[in-house]
Amino acid sequence: MARVLVDVMLKPEILDPQGQAVQRALPRMGFDSVTNVRQGKRFELELADADPATLRATAEQMAEKLLANTVIEDFKVTVLPADAESA
Amino acid sequence: MSTGHVSDQPFDTTSVFEDTAAAFDTVAKAATTPEVKQPYRELGMTEDEYLRVREILGRRPSSSELAMYSVMWSEHCSYKSSRVHLKQFGEKAPKTAALLVGPGENAGVVDVGEGLAVTFKVESHNHPSYVEPYQGAATGVGGIVRDILTMGARPIAVMDPLRFGPADAPDTARVLPGVVAGVGGYGNCLGVPNIGGEIVFDPCYLGNPLVNALCVGVMRADEIKLAKAPGPGNQVILFGARTGGDGIGGASVLASATFDEDGPAKRPSVQVGDPFMEKVLIECCLEIFAADLVVGIQDLGAAGLTCSTTELAAAGTGGMDVRLDAAPLRDSTLTPEEVLMSESQERMMAVVEPAKVEAFLAVCEKWDVTATALGEVTDTGRLRMWWHGEVIVDVPPRTLAHEGPVYNRPFARPQWQDALQADVPTAARLRRPEGADELRETLLKLVGSPNLADKTWALEQYDHRVQGNTVLGHGEDSGMVRLDAALPGTSLGVALSTDGNGRFAKLDPYAGAQLALAEAYRNVAATGARPLAVTDCLNFGSPEDPDVMWQFAEACRGLADACLELGTPVTGGNVSFYNQTGEVNIHPTPVVGVLGVIDDVDRRTRGAFEREGEILLLLGDTRDEFGGSEWAHEVHGHLGGLPPRLDLHREKVLGEVLIAGSRDGMLSAAHDLSDGGLAQAVVESCLRGGHGARLVLPETDADGNALDPFVALFSESAGRAVVAVPRSEELRFTDMCVARGLPVARVGVVDGTVLSGEAVLSGEAVLEVQGQFTVPLTELRAAHEGPFRKLFGHSVVDA
């Protein structure tokens, strides 16, 4: 069993309405120090019988094709050590 | 495509201005360094245009000024290729007292009575929707809604005429679901009902979908707002969303240059819409209007701050001073050129008298809308901008907004046009179905073809009932809304229809544009509303191609002539050029929206056959006309010959009869005949009402020749409609038709019962074409409603 994390964020220059909504809400709750919020999403994938040599490339293909909209989003693939708990 | 990575670093600003970005370019520097090479070509300007800027300014432009001229003189903003042809819409405009504001403002305004005015316009968002379908379509809706809001009106409905490549093409499976979700996502969040539109497929749109968006709004006639900045000393206030790096260069580069698929370097950052911000902005603006706090207002669309400041200044006292660095930024690394060109959504600019600034800002504060005074109106005749204390822009605003280049682009009738028109789809050229079985098969094939199949899967993603004033929505000939938003309790309503047939326009652009208008006009009249005014979205290929320019010139001439004859002026619209993939231009596609008014929405006519025993009448003449027809396209992949003949006088008479029939309560149902002919219209009306029909096809055509059942069922002759009338009204209605010289023929009855065969036993409703064939409604429904859901229903869209 291999574990892979894919973090997907809107590209820095792209408007993030959700992040902005959170950013506006936090000071109202007393968190005055917040100056910027960007919201993204994380996929935790478990792959059976995955070849460790091609694991990263496979995950990147999944991200390209489905997990991220690469026109407006960036992604980062992290391959976890075989025995690690998903973070 | 890069594999990308998540970065915590701010936006890495790389732009064509990099070489001058050491500090930033100013007017003073520009005056002393005439020799600096400037990237005008990269910004889409020709050398002549660049030299003209130098001539106007008497020096080289600063890089900010260059950015401004490049976007304002782009095809998208300046209409430099189309202007000479668009003039006709003003010159040939029919005289009508209803027109309160004509072309040139953000949208046209018409008087609909009871002290109310309605504003409406259609625009394109084609290229952005190909790059990023969801956001492209969403921001298309957002942009047109702000145009309507800017006129002082509350947006009350939107419509979306859409065109895609073949329904089964892999890229259509990417683009269509994204566009549909984007239209729905934005409009639904905004709380504006979507009451109609079209979804059309043709291979010519494969690499270049057409995403047009129409919005209509209502206000009291004395509350119209205009985009102008009069009165020196008045404050210029930017409000709404912050400015970011959205769509920089989009106006000039993306919308105006050939779309090159393998050129990601040119791809600008995508604009992302925020409908909740826009909703707040709508309510904020309407409160500001109600308190009479602005003297001029403009939304920020293509070319952002550049366009709003120059257009406001040019239409007002003539000058404006702006502190550009006061604009609230989402990204502090933006250069002044980028701030000027940014197309960040959900922004507005208002001109406010000094005494009212405080009240204005208080309303913005209430709605949690960021508002910043950027500068003031002057009478210097110059638009000047400062960036950190230095003058970076000093230009005469009219030279940007109104005195851009005008091109008389060469145009010529294409050499292939004659051959195309000579390829008439006669019975000898294209094999026609013979006998009852083949006719039945053809009917089932056509009603399930991508263009004629039921589009409920897409349309049910749009909220068409929100606001509670929709009286006719999708599936009707026109959308119709009550004007309750501006006058509570009123029965007054407006009907809207958009139509366009690229195949007809390809065969004959003059007639094609007129047919689009005639169909929309007919659709509005079919619901009982009186057609009043027109908006158009002219989607064409490259204006640098003389063939395309001829198509454009012919379409404009045709549309202007027809508007004059029908008495419905063009109030505004939009031109979209460079719709092509590689060297291949799309079919010329003028999309025409017609707005009509109905005094009492309770008298509207629906399309469904709802009462058994009622008489079906066919209005108008049927001829053997299959050029550009759905049958030739779907069955034979053929496009040739001439489009159906058009008689504008006949369209007008048909419209009068349909309106009178509605007003006097003679009609139970009416449905216009267009794509797919009589067969398609009757199938739609049967399925909507859940009742069958027995058709008795007319045996002779308009000229007394024998009429083949195939022609009677599938011909797309213009100027026709099918109506259902109660038996008690049949004589009165046919007398009215005869008195007005409108051909009328009895073609059947609404009737579910079959006289023979198996269906009788099951009691199933059927469509029977007498002497030919019988189809149970369940079979028709499966054929009509199944395909579209099957094609797209499984798609998953990432918003």
Image (spheres, coloured by chain):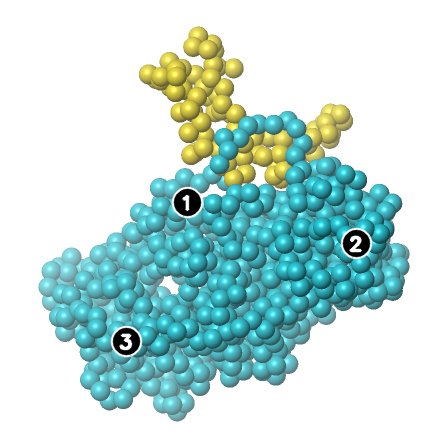
Q: Secondary structure at mark 3?
A: loop
The quadrant in which residue B381 appears is bottom right
- Residue at 48%, 63% (x, y): give it: B541
B286 relative position to B590: left or right? right
- Give the residue number, with chain letter if any, for mark 1: B174
Marked residue nearer the N-terminal end (3 or 1):
1
Q: Using the image, tell me which numbered label, if any, was put on residue B424.
A: 3
The subunit carrying tag 1 is B
- Residue at 40%, 25% (x, y): give it: A58
Q: Secondary structure at mark 1?
A: helix
Could you tell me the amino acid type at mark 3? Val
B726 relative position to B594: left or right? left
- Give the residue number, with chain letter if any, for mark 2: B34
- Residue at 72%, 47% (x, y): give it: B337
**Extreme left residue here?**
B757
Q: Identify the chain drawn in cyan.
A: B
Could you tell me the amino acid type at mark 1? Arg
Taking depth in this image into account, of B549 and B744 the one nearest to the observer is B549
- Which x, y percent locates residue B218? 63, 64
